[in-house]
């Protein structure tokens, strides 16, 4: 029951500024801004949508295959996949760096973020994994050319896939988004991303389900909902103390995919996604949380009052 997960593989660099950005910004001089903020701490984490989802799925005992690209600095990431036992179909490109995100947060929680796509922008160079028995795929945010290529590869091979639009919602024009919506049997998006889809394509959730699509919408602390041609259902988020929400949606998708590949049904699969998301938000970094299967089952049963068996 292999799951092909196509998308970004990145490093997240998190810096903290103890002051307020606003104390150093002169409104009348924004046309020639020149600022340096002295960070009090810095941490570097493994990140990227495809890698984050695979990490969550593997923790449950799933069989992910990460499909994407890293740069000349990506050797430690490839070693990490080997250590975790995660299969890969990754191009290592020596003439660029891996995708990098630099996030500086001030004392008020305001953030300044810079993202360098690097190898992600050339991810179409990664070869499709040969010989793998792939049941389902998730097509997540990546280089735009790579996403278009992956769509064609999955359609040609008859592999059903989830179109996980992510940050590409703001990059693709409406007609291209429509091509993905028509090709994918399942669409996943945050509530805001779904609004962007509607704005760019005029497709609302009801329009997509009328076409036979299933739409999964995550809504942060409010939980998540799934809409199918037969109806809809919602599951609440699991209440925990949140330390860092970055990567919570990816952890959710790992749990969802595990449930889907084990035929656990939408409600159990969505709840499992919420449980994985709850473990993630308790730790800093997208891949710094850990839970045993027994701990996952225990939290599921405590949160939803029902027993669950994870095959």
Image: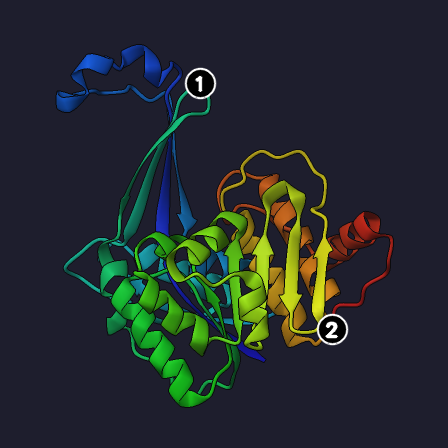
- Sequence-earlier tag: 1 or 2: 1
Residue 212 picture location, percent across and down:
58, 77
Viewer-proximal residue, 164 or 285? 164
Give the residue pinned by disc 1: 107
Give the side of residue 38 with respect to residue 30, left or right. right
Q: Secondary structure at mark 1?
A: loop
When the figure is inspected, residue 151 is found, relative to residue 174, above or below; the finding is below
Residue 15 picture location, percent across and down:
37, 29
Give the side of residue 67 with respect to residue 195, left or right. left
Q: Residue at x 52, y 62 (%)?
A: 188
When the figure is inspected, residue 14 is found, relative to residue 278, above or below; the finding is above
Give the side of residue 29 with respect to residue 54, left or right. left
Viewer-proximal residue, 263 or 284? 263
Which quadrant of the view contains residue 126?
bottom left
Q: How far apart are the alpha carbons under marks 1 and 2? A: 45 Å
Counting other residues with Cα less than 10 Å from the Cα at mark 2, is it few (<14), some (14-19), or many (20 or more)?
Answer: few
Which quadrant of the view contains residue 82?
bottom left
Counting other residues with Cα less than 10 Å from the Cα at mark 1, is it few (<14), some (14-19), or many (20 or more)?
Answer: few
Viewer-proximal residue, 191 or 110? 191
Residue 178 picture location, percent across and down:
39, 69
Give the residue pinned by disc 2: 311
When the figure is inspected, residue 8 is found, relative to residue 146, above or below; the finding is above
Give the side of residue 69 with respect to residue 281, left or right. left
Q: Secondary structure at mark 2?
A: loop
Closer to the observer: label 1 or label 2?
Answer: 1
In which quadrant will I find the C terminus? Answer: bottom right
Q: Residue at x 72, y 40 (%)?
A: 239
Residue 119 picture location, percent across and down:
24, 59
């Amino acid at each position: 029951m292999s799951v092909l997960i196509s998308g970004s593989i990145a490093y997240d660099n998190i810096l903290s500024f103890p002051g307020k950005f606003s104390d150093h910004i002169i409104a009348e001089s924004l046309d020639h801004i020149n600022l340096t903020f002295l960070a009090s701490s810095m941490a570097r984490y493994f990140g990227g949508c495809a890698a984050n989802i695979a990490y969550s799925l593997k923790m449950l005992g799933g069989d992910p295959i990460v499909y994407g690209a890293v740069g000349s600095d990506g050797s430690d990431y490839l070693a990490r996949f080997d250590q975790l036992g995660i299969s890969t179909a990754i191009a290592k490109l020596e003439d660029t760096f891996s995708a990098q995100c630099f996030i500086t947060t001030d004392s008020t929680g305001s953030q300044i973020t810079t993202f360098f796509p690097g190898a992600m922008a050339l991810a179409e160079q990664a070869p499709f994994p040969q010989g793998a028995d792939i049941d389902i795929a998730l097509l997540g945010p990546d280089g735009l050319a790579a996403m278009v290529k992956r769509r064609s590869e999955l359609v040609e091979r008859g592999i059903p896939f989830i179109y996980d639009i992510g940050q590409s919602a703001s990059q693709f024009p409406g007609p291209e988004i429509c091509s993905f919506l028509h090709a994918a049997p399942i669409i996943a998006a945050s509530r805001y991303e779904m609004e962007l889809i509607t704005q760019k394509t005029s497709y609302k959730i009801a329009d997509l389900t009328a076409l036979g699509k299933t739409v999964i919408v995550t809504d942060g602390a409010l939980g998540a909902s799934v809409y199918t041609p037969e109806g809809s259902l919602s599951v609440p988020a699991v209440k925990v103390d949140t330390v860092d929400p970055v990567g919570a949606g990816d952890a959710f998708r790992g749990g969802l995919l595990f449930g889907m590949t084990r035929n656990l049904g939408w409600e159990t699969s969505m709840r499992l996604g919420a449980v994985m998301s709850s473990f993630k938000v308790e730790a800093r970094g997208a891949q710094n949380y850990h839970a045993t299967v027994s701990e996952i089952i225990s939290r599921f049963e405590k949160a939803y009052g029902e027993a669950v068996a994870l095959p």
